[in-house]
Amino acid sequence: MTDRAFRHRLKPALLACAASATLLASPALAQGDVAGAATTVDPRLLVEQLVAEGILTRVQADRMIAKATVPVREQVQAQAQALPPVADGTQIVAHVPQLVREQIVAQVRQELGGQAKAEGWAKPGETPEWTRRIQVYGDVRMRAEGRFNDKGNGDIFTDYAVVNHGAPQNTNDATPGWIAPPFVNTLEDRQRFRLRARLGVKAQIANWVSADIRIATGADNSPVSTNQTLGADGGTGKYQLWLDRASIRLTPITGITVDVGRFANPFWSGDMMFDNDMNFDGLAVSGSGGLGERVRLFGTAGAFPVFNTDLNFGSRNAPQDSASSGPYKSQDKYLLAAQAGVDVKPIDQINVRLAGAYFHYTNASGKVSAPCQYYELVCSTDATRPAFQQFGNTVFPIRNIVADPLNPTTSPENQYFGLASKFELVHLRGAIDYRPSDAFGVRLEGDVVKNIGWDRSVVAARAVNNLGADIQVPDLSTADPNDLTAAPGPYAGGDMGWQARLSIGSVLNLNWQGDWTAKGGDWNAFVGYRRLESDAILDAFADSDFHLGGTNNKGWQIGGNYAVAKNTIIGVRWLSAEEIADAPFAIDRGFIDLMTRF
């Protein structure tokens, strides 16, 4: 034990002794003789000695002296005058019984103990009560990323995310001054360094009420990434911070939690369904309970706003006739979801987890607008286009444009693009863990998802992407039936997705979804395969690292992580994926991460 720790341990006892001496060691109780004079303990000198020894601070000493100061001398003199002197001049002093002295000491010790607890110096390192209800947490990650495109890739992929996020795209190339749409870079390699920093505070308000607030970096308000590319846009300028989480958690009953606000993914879903950085807005109710010692049930249900229509959507040029007036109708979108699962532990070394879920997105698919003049700024269903998208979902033009009657051939057709399919997802997930020791484990996990809202005939009839290889058809511009021309192949999208991953190591979820802790030397390694067809899930919320992010991809991933210190890891991943439908598009992505969390 260090000298400092020893002193802190003695502090309460010494303070009690000092206080006792203050009350009991007055001249009236003096006993003993030094050089022929009666002696006593001076409480002020005792307190000053405690300060000199480092047991009390100056502020604490001054406060104790101020609170303990009483007119002792006057009381002693009054007591002395009330007692008759004896012949030799000595003074008779009233006796204080031992029981009374012990009661006084006990009372002082209790009062000092309450003060010590309130001020946080009763025990070494103890802090005031309110600080023990606050937890600060966060992480910092530096990433080096490389994107390597196959040289045989097609270069015909329109970037519908850019179109839908900006001004509409004129799809009539006969219009004078026509400008082609933005395209996805499929040919040139890219490298970049990226930063992610997140800082959160959790507060326990009451036994069953807590709150969570977290801020994070991010190049934009993407729901699936808080990465900030170094040197992007403003060069070495400052970076933005976003409100990443803000929620209240209620636990009214043991085993039941209610989350309201913006919070972490409440479902056991994996990164194929939802990116690891994905948060949910809305309300989620989760519960869990045991059936004996080796079986536990769990489940979650919730409602989550995905898009909320602008209050003034369409107000500028909405139709003003008698049949319809004012702003356009709301196009709000929601996710309604429920999941139920079971954990089974047949023996101590093995754990099996299975879960099934249903995710229903309302108003997710695009809608064709009412007739809209070619010069209009806003059409009635513009808000049905996705507010955010990555890559992969099948899309179609949603504006019903009325051409310029004077120049119908060259009239502009300014379009936005909506999702061609509905999204009602059935998801199954399972994992088997085998852990023969605390230092090593094996996990085999997998997912299967099917979009039961997808209708091939409906989607194929209006799709403008995710088509098959070009086919040869008769050229109607010539009279010769033998003349052929290339045309897009039939729709080749799909509604299924699955993945499987094998992980080994001492911390199996190291650098994956969920909270993890690691000590120096912890590690894991993994290999996995994924096939995710175009409309199996919403591409907006899917893993943003695989392929180009989103859906309509298949391929392998391999990697590992190693803890170089407590909660500090180096991770390496290699992802090799290619397009399923449409023109060839293969891309390899490599990641090197240095991350620490606290």
Image (cartoon, rainbow, N blue to C red):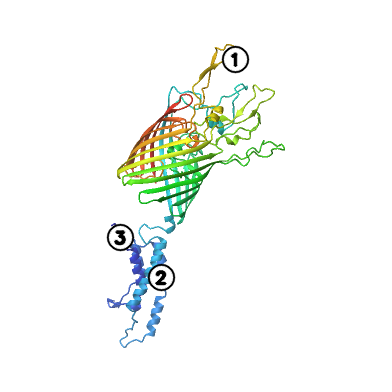
Q: Nearer the viewer, mark 3 or mark 2?
A: 3
SS of the residue under disc 2: helix
Q: Disc 3 to disc 2, how far (Cα)? A: 26 Å
The reply to whether discs 3 and 2 touch (Cβ–Cβ < 8 Å) is no
Can residue 344 be seen here? The reply is: yes
CB contact under 8 Å: marks 1 and 3: no
Label at residue 68:
2
| Residue ID at (37%, 36%) | 501
Q: What is the x, y in percent for residue 534?
A: 48, 31
Q: Reading the chain from its start, which is encountered first: label 2 or label 1?
A: 2
Disc 3 crowd rating (10 Å Cα; few below 14, some 14-19, many 20+) is few
Question: Is residue 17 shown above or below 384?
Answer: below
* Picture residue at 32% right of the left edge, 74% below the top: 40
Q: Amino acid at mark 3?
A: Phe
**Residue 490's spot in the image, x, y percent?**
52, 24
**Do we see residue 224 in this rendering?**
no
Q: Nearer the viewer, mark 2 or mark 1?
A: 1
Circle 1 Cα neighbour tier, 10 Å, few/some/many (<14 / 14–19 / ≥20): few
Q: Which residue is mark 3?
A: 6
Dot 2 amino acid type: Ala
Disc marking residue 347? none
> Hey, what amino acid is under mark 1?
Ser
Work out which residue is located at the far bottom of the displayed protein and give it.
87
Q: Which residue is more in the foreground, 126 or 333?
A: 333
For mark 1, give the secondary structure: loop
Lower position in the chain sequence, tag 3 or tag 2 = 3
The one of 92 and 392 positioned closer to us in this rendering: 392
